Amino acid sequence: MEEMKVTAVANLKGGVGKTLVVGNLGHAYAAQSVPTLLLDLDPQGNLTQHFTDFTPDAPPSVSMADVLDRSSDATLADAIVETRRSGLFLVPSGFDELQAVQDTLVGKPGAEFSVKRALDSLPAGQFTDVLIDCRPATDLVTRNAFIAADQVLIVLQPEADALRGFDFTLVAIDDLQMYLGKELPVAGFVVNQVDYRRNDHKKQLEWIKQRSAADAIPILGDPIPVSTDLSKLNAVGMGIDEMSSPSIRLRTLAAGFQTIVNALREERSAA
């Protein structure tokens, strides 16, 4: 039985496309028939809305907010729902309630370990991989995601603000090691939202490659270009491979996400 691996997908700068990466990696795992759980830890709940019919006005009966609420008896198993894709499952965010529950946990003993305890309660073998969509903030919920994770995948955009967010993410990881004894390896970078028409993006890509070599953190897959078609598919929770006749460009992007999944699984085999 393959041990469950938890990957936090993060960057402390918003707008870099973490949710798009999480969703497409989920489809890539599903295409390989790998039992996968998506965990939406962002109160915005974009991943939840992409893969289900839940909205802030029509929330799920049980969500991640209920799982983390110490006044609730809800377990993680109670919150798991099927997505629009067979074999791919999701724990919905809870939207504003997730933020409210976080506020009640601040200062409580063991608050940073709440998500880990929830994941540890799942039956062995139910899921091979868990992908956590993290919010862009160094708050209690994000620390929970990092403590629950076996590794972190950092999504970069070739923009100065996003690259500063990467540095802030590394500082947060170092703080976990220093103050909580949690060692969190960086599995790699995913470079997203590249506009090859822009000279500044080309320069930033070179910087990312240099940083990758200096820090010995691999760039997984090819850089993902800005794609309206990919964004539209992501918004309705649809995988590229589910299309009847995807364009060559979209097929190339789908292959790129498969390459990332293969790299993550090869790393597990090597470990």
Image (spheres, helix red, strand yellow):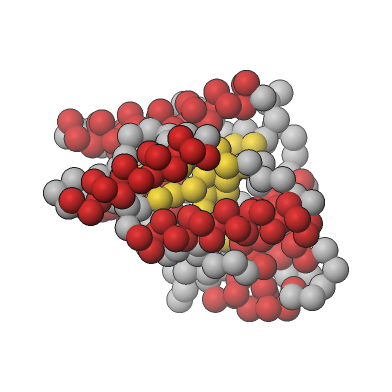
Extreme-top residue of the structure: 270
Q: How many marks?
A: 0
Which residue is at a point 46% across and 35% down the rendered structure image? 213
Which residue is at a point 35% across and 53% down the rendered structure image? 157
Q: Position of residue 242 (x, y in %)?
A: 31, 36
Q: Nearer the viewer, residue 202 or 63?
A: 202
Q: 263 left or right of 2?
A: left
Q: Position of residue 260 (x, y in %)?
A: 44, 33
Residue 244 drawn above or below residue 83: above
Q: Position of residue 57 (x, y in %)?
A: 45, 76
Residue 83 drawn above or below residue 34: below
Extreme-left residue of the structure: 197
Q: Nearer the viewer, residue 149 or 70?
A: 149
Which residue is at a point 82% across and 73% down the rendered structure image? 108
Quarter of the image where the C terminus is located: top right
Q: Is residue 263 visible?
A: yes
Q: Nearer the viewer, residue 262 or 100?
A: 262
Quarter of the image where the N terminus is located: top right
Q: Position of residue 23 (x, y in %)?
A: 42, 47
Q: Is residue 30 visible?
A: no
Q: Nearer the viewer, residue 94 or 13?
A: 13
Which residue is at a point 26% across and 48% down the rendered structure image? 203
